[in-house]
């Protein structure tokens, strides 16, 4: 068992089937805009269930040798690197200088030297330093205002998210990091009535029913736990929730091939009356390796898995787990997981979400 991972949970919840969160919703992202509560958005996949069972000691010694050999950040940050090293002690020194001199921090500090992911953590007690490392490349600001890698197009990791992740570790031990966009009971009732009247099959057009569903749902509530609601990380969680719903419900066309919307998938097979699908994204790593002395760590696997369940909606608009599985909803979740890396190159919210999941796991290791 790895000490320190117990009770650390990460859930990104997706409630309902259409979200009305738009530009005005960001005004609600303030310290008083959310109700703190227990786990929302479906099943909680915590680190006790995933990390403890997946963690292994690297018996080959490869992680220890890598830690000893690769210690310096490459000088040319515009050049892609399979493993770029970023010293947290070095970052701390640069932040101290910036504060003392009253200047902004440099871009290479703000964007963590162009890291695309963090998949290694190395500890150097003799230098009083911790080094995070992973694939990296130069960065640009895309037209959608996302800071992404020049080659891959995926979002780079950002210092602000690392700082928030470090600060959230004590809170995450007590309460899972969760986000959910929830319709009101009145909205649930209205949508349930509408869905019960829909007839799918030849000629069914998701685009035609979308305005009616949107109107039936009405305003929805954004709820967040543990993460500061005025942080960039909070915005990332909500953005990923919003984008996933839009893709599932055909409110936005997929930017990549091979990922039809859920509404398109049920066009010829119909839907389950009285129930609504629910999707969420959970962290999922193949394993977290560490050396015998626990001074070298490695995260393996994609880090992401989309999950779903079918929920029954009562006449009062109250949700409960249905006793049957929606095969089409599960198929869409599986496709979304398979296509996640490719999607992240086009929709930055998904790449940002995986970044903050990596950083929260790394923060817990630290």
Image: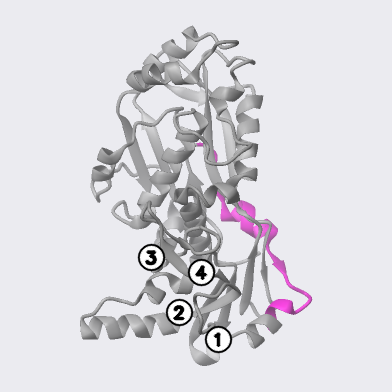
Dot 2: element: helix
**Viewer-nearest of discs 4 and 3:** 4
Helix, strand or loop at mark 3: helix
- Mark nearer the N terminus (1 vs 4): 1
For marks 1 and 2, give the CA distance: 12 Å
The residue stretch that appears in magenta? 42-64
Residue 71 versus residue 310: which sits nearer the camera?
A: 71
The answer to which of marks 1 and 2 sits earlier in the sequence is: 1
Examine the rendered structure and indicate whether residue 328 appears above or below residue 316: below
Q: Nearer the viewer, mark 3 or mark 1?
A: 1
Pointer 4: what residue? 115
Q: Position of residue 193 (x, y in %)?
A: 42, 11
Report the residue that reaches farthest toward the bottom. Answer: 126
The residue tagged 2 is: 88
Mark sitting earlier along the chain (2/4): 2
Dots 1, 4 in contact, CB < 8 A: no
């Amino acid at each position: 068992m790895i000490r320190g991972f117990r009770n650390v949970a990460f859930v990104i919840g997706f409630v309902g089937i259409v979200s009305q969160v738009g530009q005005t919703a960001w005004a609600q992202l303030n310290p008083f805009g959310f109700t703190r509560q227990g786990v929302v958005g479906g099943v909680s996949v915590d680190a006790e269930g995933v990390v403890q069972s997946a963690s292994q000691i690297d018996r080959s010694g490869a992680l220890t040798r890598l830690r000893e050999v690769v210690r310096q950040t490459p000088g040319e940050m515009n050049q892609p690197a399979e493993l770029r090293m970023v010293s947290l002690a070095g970052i701390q020194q640069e932040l101290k200088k910036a504060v003392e001199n009253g200047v902004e921090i440099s871009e290479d500090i703000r964007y963590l030297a162009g890291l695309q992911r963090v998949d290694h953590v190395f500890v150097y007690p003799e230098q009083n330093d911790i080094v995070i490392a992973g694939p990296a490349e130069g960065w640009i600001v895309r037209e959608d205002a996302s800071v992404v890698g020049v080659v891959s197009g995926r979002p780079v990791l950002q210092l602000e998210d690392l700082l928030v992740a470090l600060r959230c570790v004590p809170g995450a031990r007590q309460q899972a990091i969760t986000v959910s966009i929830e319709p009101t009971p009145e909205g649930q009732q209205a949508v349930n009535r509408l869905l019960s009247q829909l007839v799918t099959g030849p000629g069914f057009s998701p685009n035609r029913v979308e305005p009616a569903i949107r109107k039936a749902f009405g305003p929805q509530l954004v709820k967040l736990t543990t993460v500061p609601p005025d942080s960039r990380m909070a915005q990332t969680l909500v953005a990923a929730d919003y984008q996933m719903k839009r893709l599932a419900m055909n409110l936005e066309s997929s930017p990549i091939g091979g990922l039809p919307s859920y509404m398109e998938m049920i066009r010829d097979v119909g839907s389950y009356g009285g129930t609504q699908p629910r999707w969420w994204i959970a962290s999922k790593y193949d394993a977290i390796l560490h050396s015998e002395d626990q001074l070298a760590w490695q995260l393996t696997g994609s880090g992401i898995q989309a999950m779903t369940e079918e929920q029954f909606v009562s006449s009062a608009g109250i949700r409960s787990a249905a006793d049957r599985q929606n095969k089409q909803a599960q198929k869409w979740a599986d496709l979304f997981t398979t296509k996640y890396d490719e999607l992240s190159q086009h929709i930055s919210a998904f790449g940002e979400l995986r970044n903050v999941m990596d950083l929260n796991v790394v923060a817990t290791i630290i």
